[in-house]
């Protein structure tokens, strides 16, 4: 396994720049997720790291070894893609063994490594089956076994779970994290699914329009987004456009004035953001001490199992979402048309 160092990586397609001066250091054994919407440059960046796409500028190092201009087979990277790309006429064991055989590894060593890799992904009992006899999750684990069997320096995963259904995706990502941790593999995982990134990564790289918006732990990315884009992309966020009105006060375009809740406020802040889980809905005024509050009317109620999402509209016409946990089965349920007070702690807002 190896660390990865990326410096000022650029990819141009004619006049269009799809990856714009991306720099990143990934520690040995770290699990990093590239997260962003379609077209943000995350897969192109991964393909340059893998050697499948030529970089227009910049450099890539695996440990102390520069690999920027090396072909894929000399980079020593394990690759897993959205399509499993298994050979349909080969058994599970033969698929996993193929890369080792191409490297002229001794037959006994091939057998030992294949058995070890299939045991790690818990598929040793299916070694003789053909891919068509496996479920989607099992096929994806075969692809993982094939990628790790020759013990690569780094493991590169390009949306490997997107073809699976929701329940299976959760199971396989848990196995993926277990496997990565057990092997200590330096891993890059590309996804557009924020839940996947938050669940498995040590750090997340949020990308937009070819650039890195923020790099941080899942908690940092969610609780302290560096930009409005990150705040909107990661989770649901209520946004109030406006501007600062004196120390610690933010005046919304709709007229409301709220506490910013922090002395660390950007001087040109033009948007105040509130996460839905910080919003409480009360039937009676006043709001709890120290909280900000708005009179509102319930417009929609969406039951989501563990929580209920309420969409309310304020007197000024602004919409606001609130997520309330369904922990009290006997509580008095709110319904569309009910008048409420939407409130949140004074230190809950984020400003951009």
Image (cartoon, rainbow, N blue to C red):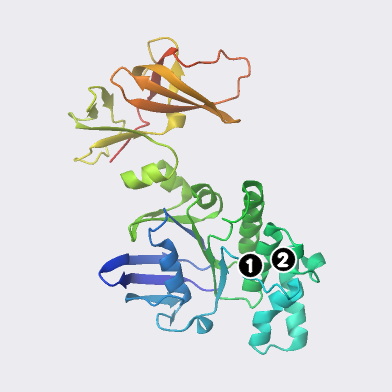
User: Could you tell me residue 179's position as x and y percent?
Assistant: 65, 62
Mark 1 Cα-neighbour bin, 10 Å: few <14, some 14–19, many ≥20: some
Q: Is residue 217 left or right of residue 229?
A: right
Neighbourhood count class around disc 2 (C-alpha, 10 Å): few under 14, some 14–19, many 20 upward = many
Q: Helix, strand, or loop for circle 2? A: helix
Query: Which residue shows up at 34% across the image and 35% down it?
Result: 273
At a point 73% along the width and 76% down the height, the residue shown is 90
Q: Where is the C terminus found, in terms of image quarters? A: top left
Tell me, yes or no, if residue 183 can be seen here.
yes
Q: Which residue is mark 2?
A: 120
Residue drawn at point x = 38 percent, y = 65 percent = 24
| Sequence-first disc among 2 and 1 | 2
Towards the viewer: 89 or 71: 89
- In this view, 65 is above or below 327: below
Residue 13 quadrant? bottom left
Residue situated in front as seen by the camera: 289 or 303? 303
Q: Is residue 259 above or below residue 130?
A: above
- Residue 156 lies, with reference to residue 311, above or below; the image says below
Q: Is residue 25 left or right of residue 111?
A: left
- On the image, the x and y values in percent for residue 309 come to 50, 28
- Quick one: 100 or 120, which is closer to the camera? 100
Expressed as whole percent of the image width and height from the top left, the position of residue 182 reads 65, 63
Which residue position holds label 1? 183
* Label pair 2/1, CB-CB below 8 angstroms: yes
Query: Quick one: quadrant of the N terminus?
Result: bottom right
Where residue 160 appears, x then y in whole percent?
57, 61
Q: Residue at x 37, y 17 (%)?
A: 296
């Amino acid at each position: 396994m190896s660390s990865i160092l990326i410096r000022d990586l650029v990819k141009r397609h004619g006049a269009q720049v799809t990856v714009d001066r991306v720099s990143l250091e990934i520690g040995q054994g770290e699990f990093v997720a590239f997260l962003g919407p379609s077209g943000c440059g995350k897969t192109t960046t991964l393909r340059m790291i893998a050697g499948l796409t030529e970089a227009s500028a910049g450099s890539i190092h695996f440990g102390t070894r520069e690999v920027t201009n090396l072909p894929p087979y000399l980079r020593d990277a394990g690759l897993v893609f959205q399509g499993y790309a298994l050979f349909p006429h080969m058994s599970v064991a033969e698929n996993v063994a193929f890369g080792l055989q191409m490297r002229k590894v001794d037959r006994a060593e091939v057998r030992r490594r294949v058995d070890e890799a299939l045991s790690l992904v818990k598929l040793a009992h299916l070694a003789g089956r053909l891919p068509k006899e496996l479920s989607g999750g099992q096929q994806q684990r075969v692809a993982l076994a094939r990628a790790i069997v020759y013990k690569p320096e780094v493991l590169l995963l390009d949306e490997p779970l997107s073809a699976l259904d929701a329940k299976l995706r959760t199971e396989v990502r848990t196995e993926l994290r277990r496997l990565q941790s057990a092997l200590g593999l330096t891993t890059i995982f590309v996804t557009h699914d924020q839940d996947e990134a938050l669940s498995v990564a040590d750090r997340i790289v949020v990308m937009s329009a070819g650039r890195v918006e923020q790099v941080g732990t899942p908690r940092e990315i969610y609780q302290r987004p560096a930009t409005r884009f990150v705040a909107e992309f990661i989770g649901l966020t209520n946004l109030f456009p406006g501007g600062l009105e004196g120390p610690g006060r933010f005046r919304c375009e709709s007229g409301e004035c709220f506490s910013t809740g922090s002395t660390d406020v950007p001087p040109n802040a033009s948007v105040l953001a509130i996460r839905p889980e910080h919003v409480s809905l009360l039937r009676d005024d006043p709001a709890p001490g120290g909280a900000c509050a708005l009179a509102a009317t319930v417009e929609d109620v969406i039951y989501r199992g563990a929580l209920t999402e309420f969409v309310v509209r304020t007197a000024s016409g602004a919409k606001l979402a609130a997520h309330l946990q369904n922990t009290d089965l006997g509580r008095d349920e709110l319904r569309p048309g009910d008048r409420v007070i939407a409130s949140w702690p004074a230190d809950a807002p984020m400003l951009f």
